[in-house]
Image (cartoon, rainbow, N blue to C red):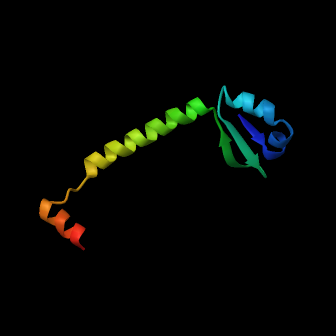
Amino acid sequence: MNISATELNKHSGRVLNMALKEPVIIQKNKYPIAVILSYERFKELEDVFWGKDTEATKINATWLSADESLNFLKS
């Protein structure tokens, strides 16, 4: 669903209700500038993002040896 920023200003309650069902893209001068989505959907996306970020970190992790860690802490 796409709406203009003007429509958001005029009908914010209706737009918030629409966002409970699907993300609402806000456009200004016909260009997308923001998205309104339900809190539940936001939490789902956040969980997916951080879960993938954690997995990527595990795969690409480089670990310091005990001596390297000690030297780092002393510096």
Answer left or right for 56 relative to 42. left
Q: Check the image and name the residue furthest to the bottom.
A: 75
* Extreme-top residue of the structure: 21
Q: Residue furthest right?
A: 10
In the picture as drawn, the residue positioned furthest to the front comes out as 74
- Rendering coords of residue 25 (x, y %): 69, 40
On the image, the x and y values in percent for residue 36 come to 67, 39
> What residue do we see at 27% from left, 46% from top?
58
Residue 60 against residue 9 in the figure, above or below: below
Hey, which quadrant is residue 7 in on the image? top right
**Can you say which quadrant of the picture contains the N terminus?**
top right
User: Where is residue 38, by image quadrant?
Assistant: top right
Asked whether 69 or 4 is in front, the reply is 69
Q: How far across and how far down the image is residue 4, in percent?
A: 79, 43
For this view, does 49 lie left or right of residue 34?
left
Q: Give the side of residue 24 with respect to residue 48, left or right.
A: right
Which of these two is toward me, 25 or 14?
Answer: 14
Residue drawn 67% across and 46% down?
Answer: 34
Residue at 38%, 45% in the rendered image: 53
User: Toward which corner of the image does residue 69 lie, by quadrant?
Assistant: bottom left
